Image (cartoon, rainbow, N blue to C red):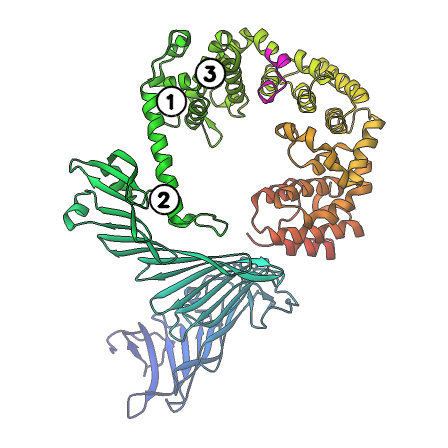
């Protein structure tokens, strides 16, 4: 303490400057050095900072802090005997900026007062925020609800994320204690935690749609994490993982639909140089390194086991490679894998390469790890043999068009793929090798909806080869060519490459048309799609009315004709007329349904309606069970019309009829899967909510909003649905939707 500075005029002369707290102080202490009675504090500039009432110094402390301009900024009470805060601690903001604002807890901008309420153990049991008018608000700054859901604890707060939260915590928020619960705005439980008196979490429960989904139980150094499925309204175990030894030992148990154990798997890292895998607690894999081999990434001693017998072992040649050997039960050799690259397996930590990834186990798995290992080994043997066969391939004279491409510079998803040799193998008489080659080609030219230079190069090569090929070889080439040309990303990813490909395709137009006319098969329909992309409608127009063509081909031809790329208005009108005429003569109910949908969608709401078509489509809308009649014709045209028949039919009928039957869509919402619900939501919103949340609400509108809110609750955060709400100007929040249904205005959730 020091008085070697001038005392401000507002500070009593008896005050001293407390260097520890950096302020002026005045008060008394008892014989034991405890503060007693009233203490006052002033800032360096002389403004009143705080007063404290200590009483006898052993019972109770009450304090108040003040803004520099006088109003109270903070107050609280402490039980000195137990050294815990009690009652209500309150912070108050001034109307202007203040040095005291640094103590105000985090909250919304419009908060002017903040309260912590303590229990008799000195723990914060709830929080309250108020605006400048003294009205209680949420942590998101919105008016605090007059009522809370019955399922929500009385002390729960409404967070900035529009969730109810009930928790007990310390003043500094460093620790939670006891029960911690979170509900959504509607009062559906989302999360429960239990904390010990030491602030450590003992149990965590997470819920989806009100049902238990996941738990974590902490017991000493062990953690058990379990996942659940809902069956007959009850949560039953789906899987549980026990973590031990700082998570170096993991044991997962999978359960059937009734929650009964099916099997267990275990991954044990015994030491840095010793790993094991188990299936139903029986050892199936072990790898041991010496300290030197681990450090220098040399091969470990590796064995796979079938019970007590060795199933696979590895023998290194000491030069960076070696041999995996598969044994039969009698100890004889069944197969070998030679030339194994040790560095690759060591760098990836993948010496258990024949086992499933440890995170990939599911309850519907039908084979044991031993069976899986054996199958994986033989598959790799087969793969090696295939690669050897490809490596030996020489491009024959009749396929020299393959060599017109510089394949080494042709970028693909697999830089190691030998596409020239794979094309040769794909066009050989061995069906198995041809299929393997086709699969390998596709892995290199298409990945996650992306295409590459090699995609165009393969298509160009097949276009050039097709005219010289005969029989099944031409059919194979045409099928693969058409599949490539129909890739959605092909026209836009490399436009100039696509233009060149399109020119070469047009040069072979006669071949394409001849093939589409003569092949009533999947490959023939693929070529019909190519003609559609080239806006060449002649053959689709012929095939749609060809009574000798299959149901699949007639339906596909109709869609190809309707989808012709870049068609003029005259071409479109001609296509509609062709489809309408085909509808009038078509005998198959499925093809008639497809034709009807196409005509209705192409004409649109503003175009002239065909009463016969509208009547047919409406029958399927009103009688959903009859939609099964359409499946055979619809299945091959899913790429054009989508797989949601019910939704497409509803879109195709006139708006007036949609309004008459929209309630059936609302009633069926909960029976549909999440992707089908996206279509239904779009239909409901287009039909009933053309003005978004400003739509004048009828009882039907309110019913729809409640049904939609239920869907949102079951698919929280499903982005596909969120886009539909945004497009139609409606809140993507179940509570806001129910408020809109109740009050005609939404209560928006804070982002």
What residue would you read off at disc 2? 373
> SS at mark 3?
helix
Q: Work out whether 591 lies above or below 131.
A: above
Question: Would you place residue 728 above or below residue 736 in this image?
Answer: above
Sequence order check: which comes first, mark 1 or mark 2?
Answer: 2
Instruction: State the image quarter where residue 452 is shown.
Output: top left
Work out which quarter of the rendered image holds the N terminus and state it: bottom left
What is the span of residues highlighted in magenta in the rendered image? 515-524
Q: Would residue 57 be counted in the magenta stretch?
A: no
**Element type at mark 2:** helix
Assign a secondary structure to mark 1: loop
Image coords of residue 463 (percent x, y) = 49, 12
Real-space Cα separation, disc 1 to disc 3, in angstroms = 13 Å
Q: Depth check: 709 or 222 in front? A: 222
Q: Nearer the viewer, residue 607 or 378?
A: 378
Residue position marked by numbered label 1 in the rendering: 411
Q: Are marks 1 and 2 in contact (CB under 8 Å)?
A: no
Q: Main secondary structure of the magenta part?
A: helix
Q: Name the front one of labels 1 and 3.
A: 1
Residue denoted by label 3: 497
138 vs 619: above or below: below
- Res 161 visible: yes
């Amino acid at each position: 303490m020091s008085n070697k500075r001038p005392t401000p005029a507002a500070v009593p002369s008896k005050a001293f400057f407390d260097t520890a707290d950096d302020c002026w102080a005045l008060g008394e202490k008892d014989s034991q050095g405890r503060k007693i009675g009233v203490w006052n504090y002033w800032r360096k500039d002389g403004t009143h900072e705080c007063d404290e009432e200590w009483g006898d110094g052993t019972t109770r402390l009450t304090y108040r802090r003040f803004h520099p301009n006088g109003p109270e900024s903070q107050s609280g009470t402490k039980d000195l005997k137990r050294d815990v805060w009690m009652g209500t601690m309150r912070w108050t903001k001034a109307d202007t900026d203040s040095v005291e604002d640094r103590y105000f807890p985090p909250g919304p901008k419009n908060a002017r007062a903040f309260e912590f309420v303590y229990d008799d153990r000195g723990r914060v049991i709830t929080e309250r925020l108020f605006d400048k008018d003294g009205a209680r608000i949420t942590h998101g700054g919105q008016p605090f609800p007059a009522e809370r859901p019955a399922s929500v604890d009385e002390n729960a707060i409404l967070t900035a994320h529009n969730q109810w939260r009930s928790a007990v915590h310390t003043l500094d928020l460093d620790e939670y204690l006891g029960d911690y619960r979170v509900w959504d705005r509607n009062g559906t439980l989302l999360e429960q935690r239990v904390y010990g008196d030491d602030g450590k979490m003992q149990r965590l429960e997470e819920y989806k749609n009100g049902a238990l989904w996941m738990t974590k139980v902490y017991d000493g150094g062990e953690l058990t994490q379990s996942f659940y499925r809902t069956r007959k309204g009850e949560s039953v175990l789906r899987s549980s993982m026990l973590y031990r030894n700082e998570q170096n030992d993991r044991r997962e148990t999978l359960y059937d639909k009734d929650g009964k154990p099916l099997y267990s798997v275990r991954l044990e890292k015994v030491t840095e140089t010793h790993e094991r895998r188990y299936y139903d607690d029986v050892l199936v894999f072990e790898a041991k390194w010496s300290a030197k081999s681990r450090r220098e990434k040399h091969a470990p001693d590796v064995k796979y086991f079938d019970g007590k017998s060795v199933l696979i072992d590895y023998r290194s040649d000491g030069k960076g490679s070696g041999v995996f050997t598969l044994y039969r039960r009698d100890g004889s050799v069944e197969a070998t894998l030679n030339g194994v690259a040790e560095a690759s397996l060591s760098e990836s930590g993948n010496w258990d390469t024949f086992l499933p990834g440890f995170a990939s186990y599911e309850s519907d798995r039908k084979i044991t790890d031993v069976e899986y290992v054996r199958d994986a080994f033989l598959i790799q043997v087969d793969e090696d043999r295939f690669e050897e066969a490809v490596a030996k391939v020489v491009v024959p004279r009749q396929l020299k068009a393959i060599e017109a491409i510089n394949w080494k510079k042709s970028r693909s998803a697999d830089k190691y793929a030998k596409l020239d040799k794979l094309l040769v193998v794909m066009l050989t008489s061995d069906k198995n090798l041809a299929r393997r080659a086709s699969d390998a080609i596709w892995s290199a030219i298409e990945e996650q909806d992306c295409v590459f230079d090699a995609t165009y190069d393969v298509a160009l090569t097949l276009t050039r080869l097709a005219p010289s090929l005969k029989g099944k070889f031409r059919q194979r080439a045409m099928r693969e060519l058409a599949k490539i040309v129909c890739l959605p990303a092909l026209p836009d990813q490399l436009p100039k490459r696509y233009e060149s490909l399109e020119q070469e395709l047009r040069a072979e137009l006669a071949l394409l048309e001849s093939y589409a006319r003569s092949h009533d098969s999947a490959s023939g329909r693929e070529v019909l799609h190519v003609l559609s992309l080239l806006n060449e409608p002649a053959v689709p127009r012929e095939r749609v009315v060809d009574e000798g063509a299959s149901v699949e081909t007639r339906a596909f031809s109709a869609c190809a004709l309707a989808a012709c790329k870049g068609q003029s208005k005259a071409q479109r009108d001609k296509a509609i007329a062709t489809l309408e005429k085909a509808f009038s003569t078509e005998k198959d109910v499925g093809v008639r349904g497809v034709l009807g949908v196409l005509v209705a969608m192409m004409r649109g709401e503003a175009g002239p309606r065909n009463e016969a078509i509208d009547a047919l489509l409406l029958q399927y809308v009103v009688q959903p069970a009859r939609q099964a009649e359409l499946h055979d014709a619809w299945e091959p045209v899913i790429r054009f019309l989508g797989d949601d028949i019910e939704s497409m039919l509803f879109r195709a009928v006139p708006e007036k009829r949609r309004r008459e039957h929209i309630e059936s869509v609302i009633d069926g919402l909960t029976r549909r899967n999440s992707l089908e619900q996206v279509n239904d939501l779009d239909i409901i919103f287009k039909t009933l909510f053309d003005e978004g949340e400003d739509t004048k609400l009828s009882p039907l509108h309110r019913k729809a909003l409640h049904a939609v809110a239920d869907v949102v609750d079951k698919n929280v955060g499903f982005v596909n649905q969120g886009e539909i709400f945004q497009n139609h100007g409606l809140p993507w929040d179940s509570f806001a939707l129910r408020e809109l249904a109740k009050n005609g205005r939404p209560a928006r959730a804070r982002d």
